[in-house]
Image (cartoon, rainbow, N blue to C red):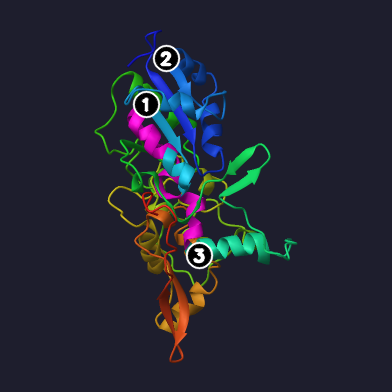
Amino acid sequence: MASTNGKPKLALYWASSCGGCEIAVLATHEKLLDVAEAFDIVFWPCAMDFKQAEVEAMADGEIDVCLFNGAIRNDHNAHMAHLLRQKSKVLVAFGSCANEGCMPGLANFTDREHILRFIYQDSPSTDNPQGVRPQLRTEVPEGTLELPEFWNTVKTLDQVVPVDYYLPGCPPEAKWVVAAVEAILTNKLPPPGSVIGMDVAVCDECPRKRDVKKITRFYRPQEIVPDPEICLLEQGLFCAGIATRAGCGALCPSVNMGCRGCYGPVEGVEDIGARLISAVASVIEAKTPEEIDAVLDTLPDPAGYFYRFSLARSFLRRTRMGQQDGRRVAEPIAEVPRLEPELAD
């Protein structure tokens, strides 16, 4: 339903994320005025004084397009995802957190109990001898204060509600935000379920030369002055460009920093971490397991490199390395039962 002024209705929402996607919207500069001219912005709590109750009062499907950024980390994130899905004709997973979990998704390397215990009890800067933690409900003279329940597992938007389109990036480049808005306005969106962006790898945008060199160790950026014309991965600098969707113009490699993978997997790659492991293995100069281990030992935090943006979407499930009969084995970490089973975590 269009507004009384005849404009289509647009909503923008920020769940579990850093706010960079909101900055990306502002980075459209004067194009933002075109958005304001073309749409009736009915919900954008980061920028204007909108209330959740106003959305709840809308008819189902009344919002024409919703750009939803952020992962699903707690009950309120999930409630807003369901609410905006119900009220929106088109729901766009906007940015890496909504698409793949991004940095919030790295929490899936551990679990809720370990996170809360470290933050409120064990961190070096914490002074909390009684181990006080936030409570879901606290009675105060003015009434009851409520906090959303912190989930055990970070999820992507489409793991919670159906999504119509995906706009990747951490954050999405402004040119793609503009392209998405223009596609919406001109009714030239790709088929539902599509990624709004390019379908080639960052390597296809990167001007550096590749000559299939083998490496015997990895370097951190401060340990080497790379050749500005040669592939960074072949110089021993980790670069995720080979498995990452293009669209940024290879910005990081252009300043001697390896691609971090924030635009998500290229078309056809289901698990970008597994693809990166394969790509890294192809450039390692090693013949024995010991030599492979020696090379990988120079890559700090390999799990963080391979799944920096995509752990919440990966095929991996939560495990912890333990000892069994003197051998290291993967042990599943039990999920924490939810208090409210109707919002299954």
- Residue 194 seen anywhere in this rendered image of the structure: yes
Q: Is residue 242 magenta?
A: no
Instruction: Identify which amino acid the numbered label 1 is placed on.
Output: Val
Dot 2, crowdedness within 10 Å: few (<14), some or many (≥20)? some
Disc 1 and disc 2: Cα gap in Å?
12 Å
Image spot of residue 163 (x, y percent): 32, 39
Dot 1, crowdedness within 10 Å: few (<14), some or many (≥20)? many
Q: Is residue 106 magenta?
A: yes
Disc 2 and disc 3: Cα gap in Å?
44 Å
Image spot of residue 284 (x, y percent): 43, 71
Q: On the picture, is 170 further left or further right than 281?
A: right
Instruction: Identify which amino acid the numbered label 2 is placed on.
Output: Ala
Look at the numbered discs 1 and 2 and tell me whether their residues touch, using CB distance below 8 Å. no
Nearer the observer, 239 or 283: 239
Q: Which residue is mark 2?
A: 38
Look at the image and give the residue range highlighted in magenta: 80-108
Image spot of residue 91 (x, y percent): 35, 33
Q: Which residue is mark 1?
A: 65
Mark closer to the chain start, 1 or 2: 2
Image spot of residue 230 (x, y percent): 49, 55
- Residue 259 seen anywhere in this rendered image of the structure: no
SS class, disc 3: loop
Mark closer to the chain start, 2 or 3: 2
Nearer the observer, 151 or 72: 151
Mark closer to the chain start, 1 or 3: 1
Quarter of the picture holding the C terminus: bottom left
Instruction: Identify which amino acid the numbered label 3 is placed on.
Output: Thr
Q: Most prominent secondary structure in the magenta stretch? A: helix
Q: Which residue is mark 3?
A: 110
SS class, disc 1: strand
Look at the numbered discs 2 and 3 and tell me whether their residues touch, using CB distance below 8 Å. no
